Amino acid sequence: MTFYDRAEELEAVRSAFESPGHDYYVVYGRRRVGKTALLKEFCADRPHIYYLAAEEAQQRQREKFVERIAERFDERVPRTETWPEALEYLGEKIHEESIVVVIDEFPYLVAENDSLPSYVQGFVDEQLQHTESMLVLCGSSVGTMESEVLGHESPLYGRRTGQIDLQPFSFAQARDVIDYEFRDAVRSFAVTGGTPMYLTLFDYARSLAENVREHVLTPTAVLYDEPRFLLQSELRTPARYLSILEAIATGHTTPNEISGETGIDSGPLSKYLQTLRRLRLVEREVPVTASRKQSKRSRYRVADEFLRFWFRFVEPRRSSIEEAPEIVYEGTIEPNLPDHVASVFEDICREALWQAIRQERLGPYAEIGRWWYGEDEIDLVGLAPEDDRILLGECKWTTEPVGSGLAEALREKADRVRWGPETRDEQFALFSKSGFEPGLETELGDDWSLFDANDFDELLSTS
């Protein structure tokens, strides 16, 4: 399989390994995000021991770990009775040469022996730090990695020399994989999101409809039940979390709406939402002009594009999909896909906006987000407090070119955004899939920036 991007992450671990002294790195992130691919790419041309843990009894886990060490040094497998003995054996070997040791899916080992972080702490303090070697602990259970490896209560707290919280690809990064023209690439990204494994499942020589039917709507396909497996790997009782995610994905975004849709009281719901946020499955939003801590106008959204798609279109219609997936796609998904894509397009516009700022096509802004109050909403609002400057932008995923009507409506809503002094500098931006009516840019003037498909290709190109 082709290895895509991750240049910054590769450079980080390469630089750490080649610098003097030992290294203890932590790599974590959601399932399928490419952690193992990253580490295998890094290890490919370096001396290394790679051990992938499995969900099995700790004795067998330990035996396999020791077997991997012995295999690397071409010697007979020693007998070990405990994890401290196994780690002591590893310690003897890493003194012989500079080597990378990767323990992948470390949470599986912790699940079988919760004392293991203490044993690894002893290994780091007493053996690893006196070498030129690198230890990498890797895991997909974000909760376990943050509590048992990175958390304040962990014996390993404060010992890491570096960490990588591996994120899904941005749209710009995903474009290296998605071999469609811009508009179809946005539609495809709205289904797969930036998770590398999901991206690489699609065959971009085929239509998006064919890919969705084969890889998402087929009951034997990997993606058909993927979100359930994801939740089961993180949570012991995922049923209520599934219902919360479905409620949010189908448009119930405030705590009251979610409670009403799921029947979960506000007290327990708050805890469930907090857990989903910790697992990066849900995001809490407040208007960009409001205080994140104090604002009561919060909305929630499913944080991943594929999960949003799945909970909106697949989970509520599983019975129908089992019987007639073609009818579900043509009757439900296809006519409603533009609405789903439009929300993803807003995120891509924000990505393009940040890139335009980096390229100095626009002035600097400290924060960019959405704004709403009552019935009024603005897709993108940028704040530059030091300059008393505000940027207000709208994103349109429509089949017709954008005209002056949208610009007039945006100017009108701008007056209702309470931020900064009355003399603030107002800038405006319009983003359109289908371009703009002739003469609009000249008509609007210098305080307006217009972005069409060609601009997106230019701004979001990684080449």
Image (cartoon, rainbow, N blue to C red):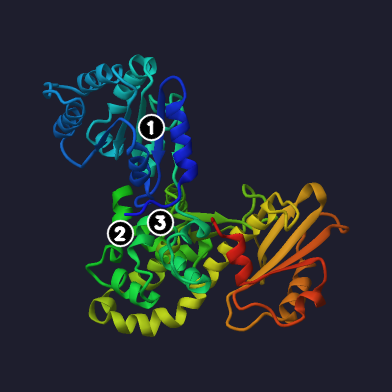
Q: CA distance from mark 1 to mark 2?
A: 25 Å
Q: Secondary structure at mark 3?
A: loop
Q: Which residue is mark 1?
A: 149
Residue 312 seen by the camera: yes
Q: How many marks?
A: 3
Q: Earlier in the sequence, mark 1 or mark 2?
A: 1
Q: Position of residue 354 (x, y in %)?
A: 64, 55
Q: Secondary structure at mark 1?
A: helix
From the image, which quarter does the N terminus lie in? bottom left
Q: Earlier in the sequence, mark 3 or mark 1?
A: 1
Q: Mark 3 vs mark 2: give the one in front.
A: 3
Q: Position of residue 374 (x, y in %)?
A: 67, 68
Q: Mark 3 vs mark 1: give the one in front.
A: 3
Badge 2 amino acid: Arg
Mark 2 Cα shell of 10 Å, populated few (<14), some (14-19), many (≥20): some
At 83% across and 58% down in the image, what residue appears? 425
Q: Position of residue 179 (x, y in %)?
A: 43, 67
Q: CA distance from mark 3 to mark 2?
A: 16 Å
Mark 1 Cα shell of 10 Å, populated few (<14), some (14-19), many (≥20): many
On screen, residue 324 versus residue 405, left or right, reads: left
Residue 73 falls in image quadrant: top left
Q: CA distance from mark 3 to mark 1?
A: 24 Å
Residue at the farthest right position = 423
From the image, which quarter does the C terminus lie in? bottom right
At 40% across and 34% down in the image, what residue appears? 26
Q: Which residue is mark 3?
A: 195
Q: Which residue is mark 2?
A: 228
Query: Residue 186, which numbered label?
Result: none
Badge 1 amino acid: Val
Badge 3 amino acid: Thr
At 67% across and 50% down in the image, what residue appears? 291
